[in-house]
Each structure stands twice: as C-alpha cells, then as structure tokens.
Image (cartoon, rainbow, N blue to C red):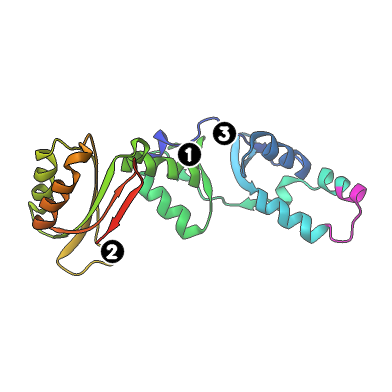
Amino acid sequence: MLVQDWMSKNVITIEVDKSMEDAVKLLKKHDIKMLPVMKKGKLTGIVTDRDLKRAQASDATSLDIHELLYLLSTIKIGQVMSKNPITIPIDFTIEETADILLKNKISGAPVVDSKENIVGAITQNDLFRALISLSGFGKKGIQFAFLLEDRPGSIKEVADIIRKFNGRMVSILSTYDNIPEGYRKVIIRIYDIDRRNLPKLKDELKHKAKLLYMVDHRDNIREIY
C-alpha cells in the first residue's frame, strides 16, 4: 500500500510572509493541524497548531487581548515555523511512512514527488484509515489469532479448515514481535461464516493450532484462550 493512495491531495499551504493570524484562520477553517510553508513555490518549512500555541504562550503571557491580536497579525510564519521539514516521498509505503512519523514523533508530513514538489499530505488519521482497510475491519467479520510454528504450510493448515466451513479470508497478518523463537503470531479475519457452525470451526482450529483469541465484531463476542 503506497502513501499516494492514502494521502490528502488537496493540500492547504501558507506563504512564509503571512502572519500567525492567517495561519490560525487556515487551520480552523479547514480543521487541520499542519500547514506546509511555501516560498516562491517551494517548500521552506512547516507550521503546526503546536508551533502557534507555543509562540503565543512564550510571547503573550503579559499581553491583553488587543495586544495579543496585534501580535498575531504582525509575527510572520517564517519566525515560528520549523525549518528543513520532514517529507515523505510519494512512492513510499504506508509502513515506511508510519515508521518515519513514529521515529520523529510527528503527526503528519507533506508528501513530495521526485522533484520535491508537494503533491499531498499524510497524517496519522490517514494511516489509521489504511490500517482499517488493510485489516478488513470495515466490514466487521470474525478475527482469529494463532500462535503457529514458523514453517512452510502452517498458515495453509488453518486456512484450509476455514475454507472447509466456507469462510472467506479477507486479511492475513503476521508478526514475530514478543513471540517465542520458532513461532509467529498470525491474525486472520474472515467473512461469511454461518454462526451456527462457529463452535465446530473453533474446535477444529484448536486441534490444529494454538488459538490465542477470537473476536466476532458483528456480535461483539470476545474469547481469549
């Protein structure tokens, strides 16, 4: 999954010589938290609602409301923006993007093409949407988690049982984090299972592999083994 499929393409930007007041109005009008700052058509920085709040707090503690409004109208974005902003190449995957945002402790970043032109913006909310789509959660269904031996064919063995009960697998995810050596955790989401056959399906799965939990999101049933 590439960032270009999940980014916001209509990017709201602000010129470097605009005021803090202009930035506050844009953030509020478009209900966003980040503005790429432009200078002569090129990205030169980024300003967030956090930057603006920090600038107001440091410069306005002893001001009355009229002085504060004047301050907001005179301080330029170039004085409060973060320079050398982190950007995301348009051909990066969602996983690469999430890793960059996490490591740099930021909630979003501009997306750029090969010529460093802004083509979009990606935020944590966009990544959440991608995760929901990737996992198949949007249509609810049933999620099973297994502890499987890390060998060829171990996933197929449980998948064959699910297919036997006419289950349609919409996502298969796996991880080695916090798992004993020689094993991996596998999470499978399925649709179209007749709930009357669910007890028998669980029994057969338990005989084939270690079942960690089952969550039926349609009926809000949760079982941890």
User: Is label 2 in a helix, a strand or a loop?
Assistant: loop
Which quarter of the image is occupied by the C terminus? bottom left
Closer-to-camera residue (116/216):
216
In the rendered view, does 85 fall on the left or right side of 134? Answer: right
- Image position, residue 188 (x, y; %): 23, 47
Closer-to-camera residue (103/173):
173
The mark closer to the camera, 2 or 1, is 2
Closer-to-camera residue (83/134):
134
Circle 2/circle 1 CB separation < 8 Å: no
In the rendered view, does 162 fall on the left or right side of 137? Answer: left
Q: Amino acid at mark 1?
A: Val
Q: Indicate which disc residue 11 carries.
A: 3
Q: Residues within 10 Å of mark 2 (few under 14, many from 20)?
A: few
Q: Residues within 10 Å of mark 3 (few under 14, many from 20)?
A: some
Magenta range is: 60-68
Q: Residue furthest top?
A: 10
The residue wearing badge 2 is 177
- Judge whether 25 appears above or below 86 on screen: above
- Image position, residue 37 (x, y; %): 64, 42
In the rendered view, does 81 fall on the left or right side of 43? Answer: right
User: Is label 1 in a helix, a strand or a loop?
Assistant: strand
User: Is label 3 in a helix, a strand or a loop?
Assistant: loop
Quadrant of the rendered structure where residue 54 is? bottom right
The residue wearing badge 1 is 112
Mark 1 or mark 3: name the one nearer the start of the chain: 3
Distance from Cα at disc 2 to Cα at disc 3: 36 Å
Mark 2 or mark 1: name the one nearer the start of the chain: 1
Identity of the residue drawn at 44% across and 54% down = 100
